[in-house]
């Protein structure tokens, strides 16, 4: 999809109210930077509460960011008249480099979409564009 592709306002409301405004996303201060069909970008600011040792962001925090990004991308291309819900079926995260005291950003794209689910690729990068982790999220839609 191109940057100019518009998202249905009902889907944007759904993503913002159920995912970005969820207790865990609010707790982590995750924000939505871009939302288009099949193309989602989120941001997670660095916080000392999210580290595992020194200033390294905990892998579970990175996995949570990937999960939310995958869910948002899954929802981004559905027919708003038919979606009733969804859930993560599978989450696989490959940690490539430590996230050392940095904000994180996602670049998410849908690899496959069917009536009942999606497979998305989520790249987690630092603010300089260095790849921190890559995740694959399989989501069920009902």
Image: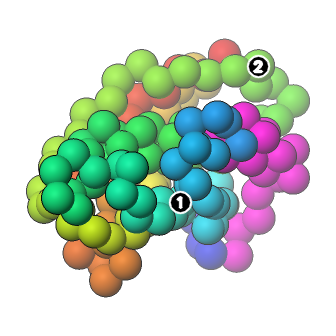
Could you give the CA–CA distance between mark 2 and mark 1, rounded to whole angstroms?
Answer: 23 Å
Q: Which secondary structure is most common in the magenta stretch?
A: helix
Residue 139: percent from the left, percent from the top? Answer: 48, 27
Residue at image location 76% in from the left, 25% down from the top = 83
Q: Quadrant of the C terminus?
A: top right
Where is mark 2, residue-wise?
Answer: 84
Q: Would you identify the image quadrant in which residue 34 lies?
A: bottom right
Say which quarter of the image contains residue 129: bottom left
In the rendered image, residue 3 lying in the magenta stretch gets the answer no
Other-residue count near label 1 (Cα within 10 Å), few / some / many at <14 / 14–19 / ≥20: many
Disc number lying in front (2 or 1): 1
Asked which quadrant contains residue 81, the reply is: top right
| 62 up-or-down from 104: above or below | above
* 1 vs 50, nearest the viewer: 50
Residue at horizontal 46 percent and vertical 54 percent from the top: 109
Query: What kind of element bears circle 1?
Result: strand
Q: From this viewpoint, is residue 137 visible?
A: yes
Q: Give the range drawn in magenta.
A: 4-20
Asked if residue 16 lies in the magenta stretch, the reply is yes
Q: Which of 132 and 35 is in front in this view?
A: 132
User: Who's the residue at 28% across and 68% down the image?
Assistant: 101
Disc 2 or 1, which lies upstream in sequence?
1
Residue that mark 1 sits on: 42
Q: Would you place residue 74 above or below residue 43 in this image?
A: above
* Residue found at the far bottom of this picture: 128
Above or below — where is 142 with respect to 130? above
């Amino acid at each position: 999809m191109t940057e100019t592709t518009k998202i249905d306002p009902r889907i944007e409301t759904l993503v913002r109210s159920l995912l970005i405004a969820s207790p865990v996303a609010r707790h982590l201060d995750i924000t939505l930077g871009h939302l288009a069909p099949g193309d989602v970008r989120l941001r997670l600011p660095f916080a000392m509460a999210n580290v595992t040792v020194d200033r390294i962001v905990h892998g579970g925090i990175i996995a949570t960011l990937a999960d939310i990004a995958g869910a948002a991308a899954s929802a981004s291309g559905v027919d708003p008249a038919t979606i009733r819900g969804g859930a993560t079926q599978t989450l696989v995260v490959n940690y490539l480099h430590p996230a050392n005291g940095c904000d994180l950003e996602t670049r998410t794209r849908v690899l496959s979409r069917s009536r009942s689910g999606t497979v998305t690729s989520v790249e987690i990068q630092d603010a300089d564009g260095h790849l921190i982790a890559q995740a694959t999220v399989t989501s069920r839609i009902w």
